[in-house]
Amino acid sequence: MKKKYLFTVLIAVFYSIIANGQGFPPPPPPPPPPGLPIDGGLIFLFIASLVYGIKKIRD
């Protein structure tokens, strides 16, 4: 009877170790952030500086 009890306990312990060892897969990584549109702002800055430069030259 004692051997049967010991065998049952060992099987339960080994089963719990194996079940815990498997774990869960890691979650998927988040998507990359969207790109920033810098083209529109650079064109506006270039045109504004060009207009300001022409105004300074004429004055």
Image (cartoon, rainbow, N blue to C red):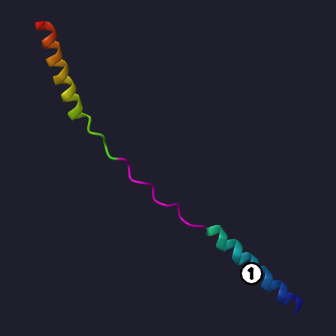
Q: Residue furthest bottom?
A: 1
Location of residue 26 with respect to 42 vertically, above or below: below
Rendered position, 7 above or below 14: below
| Whole-percent x, y for residue 21 in the image | 65, 68
Span of residues in magenta: 23-33
Task: In the rendered view, tell whether residue 12 sits above or below residue 33.
Answer: below
Give the residue at the far left of this rendering.
58
Residue 28 location in percent, x, y?
46, 59
Q: Dot 1: what SS?
A: helix
Give the left or right position of residue 9, taking residue 27 as reference: right
- Residue wearing tag 1: 12
Residue drawn at the location 84% of the way across and 84% of the way down: 6
- Tell whether 26 sits left or right of 49: right
Mark 1 closeness class: few <14, some 14–19, many ≥20 residues within 10 Å = few
Q: Quadrant of the C terminus?
A: top left
Q: Is residue 53 left or right of residue 3?
A: left
The residue located at (53%, 64%) in the rendering is 25
Given residues 3 and 59, the one toward you in this image is: 59
